[in-house]
Amino acid sequence: MAILKLRGVGKNFGALEVLSEIDLDVEKGQITSVIGPNGAGKTTLFNVISGRFPVSSGNILFKERDLGRMKEHEITLAGLARSFQITNIFQNLTVWENVFLAVQTRSPKRMSLFTRFQKLDGVKSQTEGILNRVGLSLWKDTPAGQLSHGDQRHLEIGMTLATGPELLLLDEPTSGMSPAEASQTMDLIKDLAKDVTIFLIEHNMDIVMNVSDHIFVLNFGRKIAEGSPEEIADNQEVCRVYLGGV
């Protein structure tokens, strides 16, 4: 069953067409990746799905709800969360504080002026669970800016988990990582996929081929192929435009 459906989605910036007639389904419970050369439209695709940019044409349905009629924060509340290529954390706050604040934004108590910090036991418990999940419990009192690049990316993923997503969009989660950090992130993505549907942009083809159930390929804003990792690896058009084949 598809949790996300795109039908005829296009995005223009003035006379520049960045996405054209995109049709795709992201199946619930799977890891789906989108790949393509630089400038193929991958990040723009995530931007229109997450509500950062309005679509120019077509429809985006998340759990059969039309995202084109929703604001960015409403999309997040509906169960769709997104990480960015550039790490988006509070550098001067501790690891704990970053996740705690993210969890608190979804707490039913967050609007109460009379709720004491010490009484937010549910928020604390969820914060602890997320830090365990992303492997950062030992660094909970460390300022986020002092973490390694890989751990900062894991912290950002933890902050997206705080919103309780059913669908998680990860935009190049291993960008700038060492091979060891990228391997740890691949393991984390596999673990998260037990509970959350994941839609992934990634340049590291080893990760794409090892974690993905389904892959979409974009080129010049159009979908040129889709299929299993094996099907994509054998696709001559994909090899020609992206994977370096002849």
Image (tube, rainbow, N blue to C red):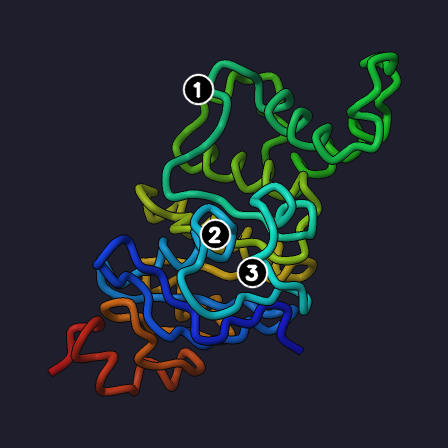
Local SS, label 3? strand
Q: Earlier in the sequence, mark 1 or mark 2?
A: 1
The span from disc 1 to disc 3 (Cα, nearest Å) is 28 Å
Local SS, label 2? strand
User: What residue is disc 2 on?
Assistant: 170
The span from disc 1 to disc 2 (Cα, nearest Å) is 23 Å
* Residue 10 shown left or right of residue 168 in the figure: left
The type of residue carrying mark 2 is Leu
**Relative to the observer, which residue lies in front, 47 or 243?**
47
Q: Nearer the viewer, mark 1 or mark 3?
A: 3
User: What residue is disc 1 on?
Assistant: 146
The type of residue carrying mark 3 is Ile
Q: Is residue 188 above or below residue 1?
A: above
Which numbered marker is on residue 14?
none
Q: Nearer the viewer, mark 1 or mark 2?
A: 2
* Residue 38 shown left or right of residue 122 in the figure: left
Say few, some or many: other residues with alpha carbon within 10 Å of mark 1 (under 14 / 14 to 19 / 20 or more). some
The quadrant the N terminus occupies is: bottom right
Place residue 121 in its image quadrant: top right
The type of residue carrying mark 1 is Gln
Q: Are marks 1 and 3 in contact (CB under 8 Å)?
A: no
Residue furthest front in the image: 14
Local SS, label 1? helix
Q: Is residue 153 above or below residue 39?
A: above
Residue 81 at x, y = what percent? 58, 48
Place residue 101 in its image quadrant: top right
Q: Earlier in the sequence, mark 2 or mark 3?
A: 2
User: What residue is disc 3 on?
Assistant: 198
Q: Earlier in the sequence, mark 1 or mark 3?
A: 1
